[in-house]
Structure formats: structure tokens, C-alpha cells
Amino acid sequence: MAITHNLGFPRIGARRELKHATERYWRGDSSQEELETAGSQIREQNWQRQAVLDYAPVGDFSFYDHLLDNSFLLGHVPDRVAITGGNALDRYFRVARGRSAGDDDASAIRAGEMTKWFDTNYHYIVPELSADSTFSLDADRLLSQVEEARKSGVTPKPIVVGPVTYLWLSKAEDESDRLALLDRLLPVYHELFETLAANGVDWVQVDEPALVYDLDVDWKKAFETAYGHFADTSARLMVTAYFGKLADNIQMAANLPVAGLHVDAIKGRDEVSKIVAALPADKVLSLGIIDGRNVWKADLAGLLDWLEPIAKQLGDRLWLAPSCSMLHVPIDLASEKNLDPEIKNWLAFGVQKLGELEVLATALNHGRAAVQRALDGNAEAIASRRASARVDDPEVKQAAAAITPQLGQRNTSYAERAEQQYNGLNLPEYPTTTIGSFPQTKDIRKARQRYKKGNLSREDYVAEMKREIERAVREQEQLDLDVLVHGEPERNDMVEYFGEQMAGYAFSEYGWVQSFGSRCVKPPILYGDIRRDQPITVDWLKYAQTLTEKPVKGMLTGPVTMLNWSFVRDDQPRSQTCMQLALAIRQEVLDLEASGINVIQIDEAALREGLPLRRSQWQEYLDWAVEAFRVTANGVADTTQTHTHMCYSEFNDIIGSIAAMDADVITIETSRSNMELLDVFDDFDYPNEIGPGVYDIHSPNIPAENQVVELMNKAGERIPPERLWVNPDCGLKTRQWDEVSPALANMVSAAKSLRHSHA
Ligand code: GLN
Ligand code: ZN
């Protein structure tokens, strides 16, 4: 009998109930009790949804971040928070969000650092370690949720992040050896497992996704030490690996002295036979066969063909699950009333994926006939997607197949074209610019919503956006910036905005996925060949350019970022989809150029974060990602200046690829690191121009002129000043005008004083 379980369910609620409840609490509009009630309602609903499973997850719910919960579970709370008053929930939110010093409260507290959870778009709060870190078990919350789960009728399987992955994801602020803390951590985990067992828990899920990385000897040994230490525990441990293959960690993982191992059979189906062979005869194998990272229906018949012999071989030792926690997919497709029915029929969100799991288990346990209708319906949907004319666009495929390296090649070298650009654009030294967006005011958002709902005519909407563009242009002229932008008022989101105007993209209404804390994103669904028939940005940009003599920079989202921030097709390689996006955006670039826009920025905010987890796969990714950018950007004349922008600017290992994109100018995020991120340019002679951010747009602070000068002088030690630009770290859409204007004024006067002293 195959057993079913889940590695985690989304906690935000189908209507983002958690977001609303926590934000109400933070605003002071509700009590802690009300927040707790909202939390338990969401948990209860989730368990009801998962009642079909043999084991339901407990501990996947969190008010902010499950890794932060894990830190509290281990009694590992930063001192700056532990010593302040308030109850546990207050301390918890203080680590998550920080606290700014107010009039009546002079105790500002820095929030914990946030970073991306593996290669997903979820962000966790980084545990802060030092050589003196101590741990002590605080399991009350987890235990009470175990009790709660039992009351709602499911068999609870508590989830914790395992000790090795916990250390892997931590940061030692004193640069001490993280693994040295393992010895201190293991007894606390041991106590936790014993406590859970004493409370009637049978299985505990111990998440160890660090198992899918390239591990050196020390980290491999840490796994063996840790699980060796737990060998005598009374609870049965299911160690879970996900987000990739085990590869050279198969032998080690298969032989850890625990009761079960979960592997990602979406990413690593081809290594499952090796794992089965390596597994000791008494060990449970959980196969993650339903994609926890994407939204497509699984091909159930195809899966059964593959699973049936494995089920025969493993019998009771086979468990079935999604590949990873469902945290990364939307909750319920049934909420979607406006999705095209043909496309909707190809999709499965969280609830639907649980249904698929149940069908597979029933088919394995009782024969396919027991679920014939469900299997027939699934087969029909899979066939409909494969044959659909909506997916397939032969013309697009042909164009993508005809891409040659030539297409990504500028006509001349950077040095030759740079001179033409400077003359044509009439740029001074240390030119100033911004990254594209200006504050998205309440009025802008209101107008967009009214327009979307049909309460504002197209004409009135356009007029209102044009007023905003004019305001932004006037302001920039007054500030005396050199390369202006139109301000992006018409964009809700930099991916959705472009996706909405291309064929091959679909959009959900409630397909929210948690990004961090109460923040959610709604990734578009990329289902078919990509086609752009109409110009997308040209009218806005042309209008902006009529308002000023200065160059206005056209603003586009690049193909790699479009890809990395969407749910993508699983029926063709990502690289192919990316090339189709590149061709579509290339067309937009050429149309902008033809309409007189001579500076064009192609944002690749997500290029760096898309790097595969394993280093051995980096080059392949970088090769096609860079090629896609080149195809998008490099078809322009010498006189057109191309820019790109990246948010995450840790380029140490990939600087060669960044240079190979051959953008004339790259703007990056560096101000918060005090230009330290530019160290990479000590050894690498970056050939083109760079705008290292001098204004931290994530903070309300306004940089002073001398601070900007100082930062730029630091940058000038690594990059020849004649190739430096002066600009903020990122777009300004989350800031207020009364912060942005003085900050940019200081930035511009800093640039002027730099020109002066440099001349
Ligand atoms: N052009 C975008 C903006 O200014 C870039 C945003 C980003 O890099 N995430 O908002
Ligand atoms: Zn950015």
C-alpha cells in the first residue's frame, strides 16, 4: 500500500487571509487573540483540505517565515530581540520586521536579513550565528499545533528544518565556522524528536534540502554525524531532499540511519532507480512525483506506467508526495472564474495537486479501474494541451530556430560606439539617471484599478497616466538629470505588464504565492509560444520624449527576468521559451529605436538569482541567458545606447558573463554594501560603463551630497571615472515623492561636484 503525505501547504489562505490578518495586527487594528484565531482557522482549513492524505503536515504554518519559526523552536533568537520586552509574538515580529525608533520608543531594532530560499522566489529570515550561539528547545507552539491537527481529524506529521540545512542557511556574522555549532545543535534536535514521540507523534519530517547541493567533505560528514546522533531516537525520521537531484550525495543520503528518505522525482526522476538500489531494505522511500513548483496537471497515466513496477518492488515502503512543499504554488484553481476554460483545464493548483496524489495512490493500491474516470479526465486534459493550437505557433518556433549568433552582435566594439553615443546624446561626465520607476502614488493605483474594473474609460486613463508622465519628466528636468525616464506609472508589475500584451501568457486572479512575510506575488502563467504583435511601450515613451530635449530612456523587462518570475512551460526547455521572449522584446527594442528613443534599458533583475543550485550547471544557464539578452538588446544601431539593470549584484563568479551581455551601461545595487560589491572589478577589467547605485531605495534615508561623492570616489578606485554613471540602486516606485526629490537633488549636485573636481 502506497502511503500519501504532503511536505507543506501554502499558509497565506485562498483569499490571502493571513496577509490581511497580520497587516491588521501590525497596524494595531486587531488583537493578538484575533491574529491567533485567524491563524488557527487557516490551519484548520488546510488540514481539512489534506484530510485525504495518510499524513498531514504540521509546522508548515507560520505568521511570517518557517525558518524564523525554526529559529524560535531552537531557542535561537538574536540578543537584540531577546532582551527587549513584550511577548513571544512581539519578539518574533521584531526579528522579522525590525522596529524603527519612534518618539515614545527610542529602541530601534534591526530586522533580520532576508534572502532567497534556494532557487525560489520565497525569502527567509537568515539565522544569525556566532561562535557563542546557544540553543534550547522551545517546542510549545509545535506541540499545540500537533494537538490541534489531531482534533481536526488528521494524522499529524510535524515538519522541522534539519540541523545541517539550518546551519547551511545561517550566516556567521563573526565569520566563525558554522559547522562547529553542530555539536551544540544536535542535543536540542534530539530532545525535540523525543518530545514529539512522547506526544504520540509517529513520523517527523526533517527537511534537508541542502542535500541537493555540491557538498564538500565537511558538510557530507555533518550529515552523517547529525543523523548518527539521532539513530536511537524514538520518532521515525523522514529526511527530505528537494529542489534538485541528490547526484553524488545518493549513497550518503540513502544510508543515513533514519526511517525514510524523500527525493524530488520531478527534478530527479532519472536517478530514482539508483536511489532504490542504494536504499537499505527496511527504509521508506518517498517519491515527490507531483510538481510543487509549477502549475501544470501531472500526466497521471504516464506516472503510473513508471510507478507501478516501483510500487511492486517497494510495497509498503513507497510513499507518494509533491516534489517539495506546496508553498510555491497557488492554493485552489476553483477560485479562478476568468481563466480561459481550455487553459484552466491544463492546470492544477495546490488543492488539485492533492487530488492527483490521491488518484495515483488509489490506482496503485486498488488498480487503475478504481479511479478510471479521474484517469480518463486527466488523459483528456493532457492530450488537449499537447494538441492545442493555442500552445503551438509554428511561425514563432521557426523564428526561434533561425536565431544566429549574428543576431546578438553589435555592429562595432564598445569603444567605437560609445563615442558616437556620448556625442549624439550630449552627455557630460558622470551622467545621472534613474532606474525607471517613480513613486506609484495612491492616485496612480486607484486609476489603474478603476480602469481595470471598467470604471474609468481608456481615454481618461491614458490622460491620467500622461499627466503622471509629465509630472515625472518636469521633475527630472528641474532636478537636472541627464537621461530621463517616463516613470512607469502604467505598470502594475514589471513582468505582468509585458506578459499581458503578449500571446502565450495567461493570468490568474487569486494565484498568489508568498514572497516574504505578508507579501505575495502572482506569477503569470506562460503556456504557449510567445508572440508580440503590437508595440507595448512605444506610445508612452514617444509622448514622454515630446516633453523634453533631453534623452528619455525606454524601459523594458528582459527575457530572463520574464522567464524567472513566471510559471513556465514544462513541455519545452526553459532556454527555448527564453529565446522566444527574447525575440518578442527585441521587436519592442527596435520599434522604440525607430520611434526616436535612443537610450533603451532592458531590466534583468532576476538574471543572477536564476543561477542553478549546482555550480556544474551554471555555465549552461549563463550561456543561454546571456545569449537571450544579446538577441534582445544588440540589434540596435551604434548610436543607440543600451542599458541593463540588476538588483542582486554579487557578480564575483559570473562577471565574465555579465560583460558578455555587452550592454553599454549596467546599473547595479551597491550602496548598502558601501561599494564592497565592486571588489570584483579589482581583478576583472570590465569593458563598458557602470552605474553603481548610490541611493539605497529600500530605506527612507536621504543620502547627503558628500556621501554620494564618497561612494562614487570609492567606485572610481576600481572603474575608470569616465565610464561611471550616477544613479540610485533600483526603481523608486515604493518611495514617496518627498523622499525621492531631495535624494535625487543631492545625487545630481554630487555628480556636478565630481565633474568639477575631475575636470
Ligand atoms: N525598471 C524597474 C523599476 O525601476 C526595475 C525594477 C527592478 O529592478 N526590480 O522599477
Ligand atoms: Zn533593481
Image (spheres, rainbow, N blue to C red):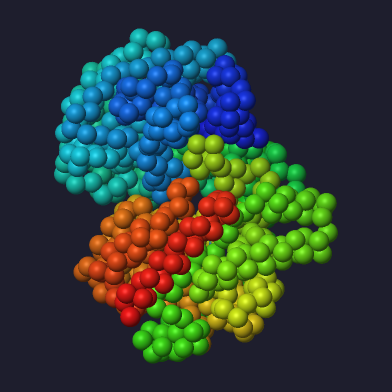
Closest to the observer: 494 or 238?
494
Task: Residue 79: give x, y in percent of width and height.
Answer: 30, 27
Task: Residue 721: give x, y in percent of width and height.
Answer: 32, 75
Task: Residue 556: give x, y in percent of width and height.
Answer: 56, 68
Q: At 40% across and 11% down in the image, what residue appears?
A: 200
On the rendered image, what quadrant is the C terminus found in?
bottom left
Please tell me in which quadrant of the rendered image residue 182 appears. Answer: top left
Q: Is residue 386 left or right of residue 668?
A: right
Closest to the observer: 606 or 450?
450
* Above or below, 435 relative to 211: below
Q: At 40% across and 42% down in the image, what residue appears?
A: 114
* Above or below, 59 relative to 455: above
Q: Is residue 668 left or right of residue 403?
A: left
Q: At 72% across and 54% down in the image, what residue appears?
A: 448
Closest to the observer: 233 or 710?
710
* Above or below, 100 relative to 737: above
Q: Is residue 390 visible?
A: no
Task: Residue 627: give x, y in percent of width and height.
Answer: 43, 73
